[in-house]
Amino acid sequence: MNTGRREHISRQDILLVSISILASIVMLFIPTGFEPPEASPHSMRVHATVLDVDDSQVREYGPVIEGTQHLELRIDSGRFKGEVQESINSIIGKKELDKVFEPGDRAYVVLDLNEAEDTIVYANVIDHYRSAKTLALLLLFFITLFAVAGWIGLKSIISFIFTGIILLKVLLPLFLHGFNPILTAAVVVTILTGGIIFLVGGISRKGLTAFTGSFAGVLVTVVLAVASTHWFELNGATSPFLESLLYAGFGSINLTQIFIAGIFIASSGAVMDLAMDISASMHEVLEKHPTITRFELMTSGLTVGRHAVGTMTTTLLLAYSGGYTGMLMNFIGRGVPFENVINMVFVSSELIHTFVGSFGLVLVAPLTALAGSLIYIPGKKERQEEDATPLREAQ
């Protein structure tokens, strides 16, 4: 296949895309058992524009801001659109929880209505209104992806949406319902891996090689995650917001198993990416050199894998470290001894995330190269090539 030739859209591609879209739509309407409650008949969710802010009761104590903002709001949606309301915004001195408004900001507001529902009793400001910005950013990402990658980009967009829906509508609700997190995550990741790889790469030897390598890499990561978590005596409670579920009616969930599941879920994307890179490279090598032997093809795959692993392991480190930058800065700023830091459960948990994910990434390279050599050049073809070698040499 010429790399410069325009990509052909096959019936198989169209069928897979159609199935993925249909499956995504169906899953959107499947009840999870954790749907948000219906809005109160005497309340309404809207967005509003902040017209004016009175900060006379706000005080600054160094980096801490406390007090109450008095806001003047113009309702921008719903049947009360255009009305002006007053509200207050309490600032308690915690930046992670506080929101501070300025004139011109847009706010997400819940309106409390009277019994007749024809008058606003109070406008409760929840936070800044970010829904439109989130949608705009998502659309910009999709447009860029399609503009750069064309038909493959469109398939990537569909796989992106499909993955997000499965995580929100299948995986996490099953965790909350008490299903075994490790087994559930392994099954869901396998389904996602197959769906994404075959959607993007097609049902072909290239897709089968990438799937086989990814599956083997994820399996290795699962085993390492289970062993390392128990070896380091971690309980999984370091994950943000996870422990609070125990006190919110989900006392039966297993925090340790959810922590383990999170390790190989987080690394599965990078594993899948590397497996597809190696598989596609081996496919190109075979297309350019049809007479290549199985061992030579495997060596080519390993060469590509070695170069990719060299940068992707560092990529994983940077990706994970971004999540705990504040924690490490806190320890460094307080002068906490390095040995103390290493032995803290929070740090150990993040190290397990980083290194176990990297282990799976390193091992997926030889596993994919081995799988590709067997799939691209079956035993029968290998024997035929060997039998034909003396004839070629004689010629």
Image (cartoon, helix red, strand yellow):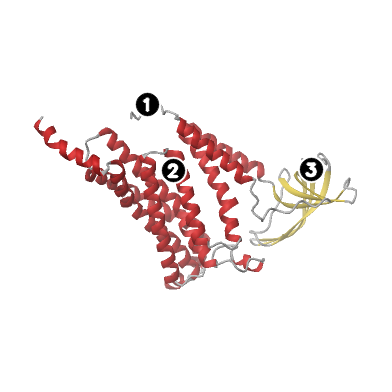
Do tag 1 and tag 3 residues touch (Cβ < 8 Å)?
Answer: no
Q: Decide if residue 85 is on the left or right side of residue 63.
A: right
Q: Which of 209 and 325 is in front in this view?
A: 209
Residue hosting label 2: 197
Q: Using the numbered discs, state the Cα–Cα distance from disc 2 to disc 1 in whole angstroms.
A: 22 Å
Residue type at tag 3: Ile
- Tell me which label, 1 or 3, sits earlier in the chain: 1
Q: Using the numbered discs, state the Cα–Cα distance from disc 1 to disc 3 in whole angstroms.
A: 54 Å
Q: Nearer the viewer, residue 146 or 265?
A: 265
Q: Badge 3: few (under 14), some or many (20 or more) residues near its Cα, within 10 Å?
A: many
Locate residue 314, reporting x and y percent: 39, 53
Q: Decide if residue 7 is on the left or right side of residue 102.
A: left
Residue hosting label 3: 75
Give the secondary structure at mark 3.
Answer: strand
Q: Is residue 234 depicted above or below 215 in this figure?
A: below
Q: Residue 5 shows which numbered tag? A: 1
Q: Decide if residue 384 is on the left or right side of residue 370.
A: left
Q: Can residue 336 be seen in this view?
A: no
Q: Residue at x 79, y 43 (%)?
A: 75
Q: Can residue 251 be seen in this view?
A: yes
Between marks 1 and 3 in the image, the one whose residue lies nearer the viewer: 1
Between marks 2 and 1 in the image, the one whose residue lies nearer the viewer: 2
Between marks 3 and 2 in the image, the one whose residue lies nearer the viewer: 2
Q: Badge 1: few (under 14), some or many (20 or more) residues near its Cα, within 10 Å?
A: few
Choose top left, top right, bottom left or bottom right for residue 81: top right
Q: Using the numbered discs, state the Cα–Cα distance from disc 3 to disc 2 in whole angstroms.
A: 46 Å
Locate residue 256, reporting x and y percent: 51, 67
